[in-house]
Image (spheres, helix red, strand yellow):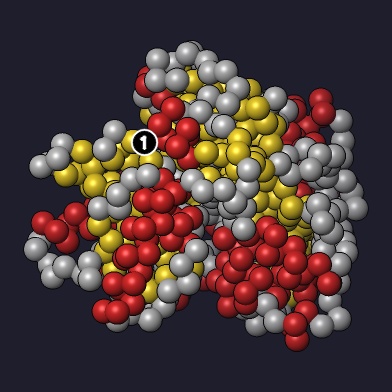
Amino acid sequence: MGSGKRLKMMTVLEQILGQAARKPQARALTLIDADGEEKVMTYADLERASWRMAAALRQWGLSGNELVLLLINDLAELVPLFFGAMMIGALPAILPVPVAGAARKSSSQLRERMVQAKARLLVTSVGMRPYLEESGGVPQTAIVVTSELRGEPADVFPRPLPDLSETAYVQFTSGTTGQPKGLQVSQGALASQVRHYAHAVGLNAGDVMVSWSPLYHDQGLVSNMLMPLCHGVHTILMTPSTWLRNPALFFQAVDRYQGTISRWPNFAFLYTARRVTDRQMASLSLRSLRLLASSGEPITPDAWPVFKERFAPYGLADEVMKGSYGMAEYTLCIAMVPLEERQREEALSLRMLNEKGLAVAVEKGGKGSQVFVSSGKAMEGAEIRIVDERGEFCADRVIGEIVVRGDCLIDRYHPDRPFPEDSFCNGFFRTGDLGYMVDGWLTVTGRRKDVVIAGGNCISPEQVERIAAGISAIKPGRAIAFGIPDEQLGTEKLTVVCELVHDDQKTRQDVRCRLQEEVLRELAVWLGRVEFREPGWIEKTTSGKLSRYRNREKLLSCFQENRPATSG
């Protein structure tokens, strides 16, 4: 894996090119398409293709520190373009490919992103033209199709590679609580993250990474592609759309290539357990898997037991899954459950949490309690603290805002705008997340901006959504809670919007009554409004998380336009 000093002094690009020089014929990437067909790229293949794309981008007038947007679903085209842009000092930013069947909404969001980005180029595939034409484009951004890119590597060799002080790429946040922002990820922060995360997961030469996580997300890009490539680890990639259509492809790849490590968002554990059949798993073995890290969204206590029980017969080890905590503003990972320790979780009194701001452990399954899963301990290079509303550090088991500092922290938005001063507190970055510490272990309880103040009680929407998740008439993952202003009472009205498996008036009435009864019993607050919407109405972020900001604004817009109520 190389010495810590060596890795610390080298950019990620230099590390990957170093692997190409030392073992050019070793497998770097195996790319799996929607049909299950595989394309292998050695380190030499990856280097040649990347230099070729670097030359092609230069011929289109792209130069250092200019932004290039990549809207491409074909990994064999996307990956070399990403590295090629970095090679000439340009700033690549990978965008999510619009979802089929949602062209109008996707094209509108794409245009907003293009206007915000002020990019020099947007590179896309031929199949994306309809979306781009509908978006209307923006004057300052030239649109280039991948088939138009031609270049010879010799055209760019003389330029020095970027150093640790320069920007590596632009990472767009998912927009969970507001509009997505472009973060300037520095080469230094990226190199530090790759080094620390490799140490945290115990990466070694015998590992094989298997991933379907999107490369437009820090999880897929940093932990599941850049880190293993830097350390000479064979990496198996497929797109999220490929995995969603056939999640068994992940297990087939693990079995075929003896995959050892991956990183998933929480929803994927239940999704996979429900979608993959025994027939698809026949003759497959998961014994080689040693780590499935969970990140990207709140960790729920029900997902892992269901996943473990479902796949234990195929060799899945009991302790393979580990919680973690991270965010794009810290490049990727901040905390993780140590490999040598067991995952921790505990039931908390919701009354003490919501009324007193204290994490008081109670017996699991008791009335008015919920189980919270720990995200582990601070990773090497990171320091985590909890602060109260005055910015003072909190004692163990006191709920407050999670703040962090370390060598992977990013401090600028694109184009080159520093974070606002109120983003920091006593030298720590304010994450906006709420949680508590116990003996160095971090547990996340919610988002500060999401907290609903109803009748003087501070309610985390996740607590309400967990109750909704237990009602079988509601589609899995299709219920969202937030507060809307109640001017008459001078408070917020706790509101749930949900989509039903079978939508009719009786089901609506039953679901509304049950939701209100269970929320009142568990949280001691009244659920003021239950809205029912058609399938697909609830919006999620590009990372698959519920977007409270967009859904709240969308619902308020419906009210303002006096659209027919659908609250049942």
Judged left or right of residue 267, residue 534 is left
Asked if residue 293 can be seen in this view, the reply is yes
* Viewer-side residue, 457 vs 201: 457
On screen, 412 above or below 145?
above
Farthest residue to the right: give it.
Answer: 206
* Viewer-side residue, 275 vs 342: 342
On screen, 259 above or below 528?
below
Q: Residue at x 62, y 58 (%)?
A: 302
| Position in image of residue 32 (x %, y %) | 69, 72
Q: Residue at x 56, y 39 (%)?
A: 348
Q: Which residue type carries mark 1?
A: Cys
Asked if residue 112 can be seen in this view, the reply is no
* Viewer-side residue, 432 vs 220: 432
Examine the image and state in which quarter residue 361 appears.
top right
Pointer 1 local density, CA inside 10 Å: few below 14, some 14–19, many at least 20: some
> Which quarter of the figure is the N terminus placed in?
top right
Q: Residue at x 38, y 81 (%)?
A: 502
> Which quarter of the figure is the C terminus placed in?
bottom left
Q: In the rendered image, which residue does mark 1 sit on?
A: 458
| Position in image of residue 54 (x %, y %) | 59, 52
Judged left or right of residue 71, residue 335 is right
Give the structural element (helix, strand or loop) at label 1: strand
| Position in image of residue 97 (x %, y %) | 46, 65
Judged left or right of residue 169, residue 188 is right
Judged left or right of residue 360, residue 103 is left
